[in-house]
Amino acid sequence: MSTSDDRTRQLLVYLAAALIAGGASSHEVEASIRAIGTRLGQPGVQLHAQPVGVTLSLGFGTPSTYESVEGPLRLDQSAAVADIQQGLLAGTMHPDDALIRLRGLRAQPHRFPIGGMYLGALCVGIGLALILQPSWSAVAFGALTAPFVAMLMRLAARGLLPAALLPCLAAFGVSLAAFWAHRHGYVTSPLRTLLPPVAVLLPGATIVTGLSELVNGAAVSGSARLASGATQLVMFAVGIIGAAALLGVGGDALQNTRVDDLGWWSPAVGLVLVTAGICLQESVPRALAPWIFAVLAVTMTAQLVVQAWTDAAWPGAFAGAAVASVTAWSVAVLRRGVPRMVLFLPSFWLLVPGSVGLVSVAQLGLEPALSAPTATLAAGVILAIALGLVVGTTLARVVRTIALRLRRPMPTAESA
């Protein structure tokens, strides 16, 4: 093999690992890398993408390379990966330049290093409280406990706290505060009130991406993601159960009751705060913030309208996921340079598949009699989101095909 082949193989495996770390599903990554390989003169690329790593060779019988996935990327890093991906596909970026950018990807500095983490967590905690549990007590609780979760996240990122224990410790600390506040009459439904501060850690995207991979035939990676997401939910539930056992809470504290004391304006304000929090925590480039807000807005609107029309959660979840997928794809096609995954991934914070799953698992451990309705709701919502994602992606590909055909120059009389 030549030095050029070695560098091409290294470039493709680095790019594949970066796409996986950015939240892309394995079947999408494999299709994209094969297309880029063909563009670079390597049509026989073979690869096996998994959530933890990628194995790649340039053809049958040629040397292979394995690259591990070292944790998730921030949204600004995912935007850089999408720019590299599009540049290679379009032929506007030299492979050597792409390789240099990929090697320095993890070292890309955060735009708002410390203040952004805490202020972003505060905005998300308050914003999600306005959407999931619109009451002043829930808003105050989210504002007080979200910085605690941000502190744990920062300690884990610096290696001062085992990352595997982060879900359990965050859930335990927030649950202690929620159950204590309920005991003293400050909050009405602690099990739902504690969700906004910890929502940033919930594995909703992991679970739904795993289901999407299973639907598309990627059984190994899909099963791995589902197992990982389920394990994280169990770790969260262990923290909640531990706090409940320590304080000796009763069954009235375990009801999944939604309180709405603030009126029609709370979801709109919550959406603005969630968008701001995501941009601060994820170091989102300023030019992408309006597009993220637009996708979140149409996602939440579709979800709320369909839920109000059908009086059920799963149709709204289906509509929200489908609209989020179509909108993100459409914007990425019509506005070159706007990465689809960066627009789409924040929608999981509104669709909350992880939140309803966490409530059902916690109820199962604390009060099994209460868990059946919530578990049924969780299963329906998660499956509806996965189905909406598949349907939305299919519709979006139709939009992309039409847009690409419209962009092609019409044949002139001379060319005819």
Image (cartoon, rainbow, N blue to C red):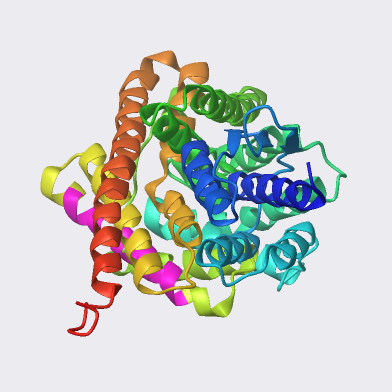
Task: Write down the quadrant of residue 95 in the picture.
Answer: bottom right
Up-down relation of residue 31 to residue 81 (above or below) = above
Up-down relation of residue 128 to residue 235 (above or below) = below
Seen at 79% across and 58% down, the residue is 103
Up-down relation of residue 329 to residue 16 (above or below) = below
Q: Nearer the viewer, residue 165 or 78?
A: 78
Is 369 situated left or right of 34 in this image? left
Up-down relation of residue 5 to residue 294 (above or below) = above
Seen at 70% across and 44% down, the residue is 71
In which quadrant of the rendered image does the C terminus lie? bottom left
Is 47 situated left or right of 219 in this image? right
Q: Which residue is farthest right?
A: 160
Residue 78 in sight here: yes
Q: Nearer the viewer, residue 347 or 254?
A: 347
* Residue 153, horizontal then vertical, whole percent: 73, 49
Q: Which residue is farthest top?
A: 368
Residue 72 in sight here: no
Residue 298 within the magenta-colored segment of the rendering: yes
* Residue 241, horizontal then vertical, whole percent: 59, 24
Q: How many marks?
A: 0
> What secondary structure prevails in the magenta region?
helix
In which quadrant of the rendered image does the N terminus lie? top right
Residue 212 within the magenta-colored segment of the rendering: no
Task: Write down the quadrant of residue 298 in the picture.
Answer: bottom left
* Residue 122, horizontal then vertical, whole percent: 60, 63
Task: Write down the quadrant of residue 120 in the picture.
Answer: bottom right
Q: Nearer the viewer, residue 23 or 130?
A: 23
Is 71 situated left or right of 107 in this image? left
Residue segment shown in magenta: 290-306
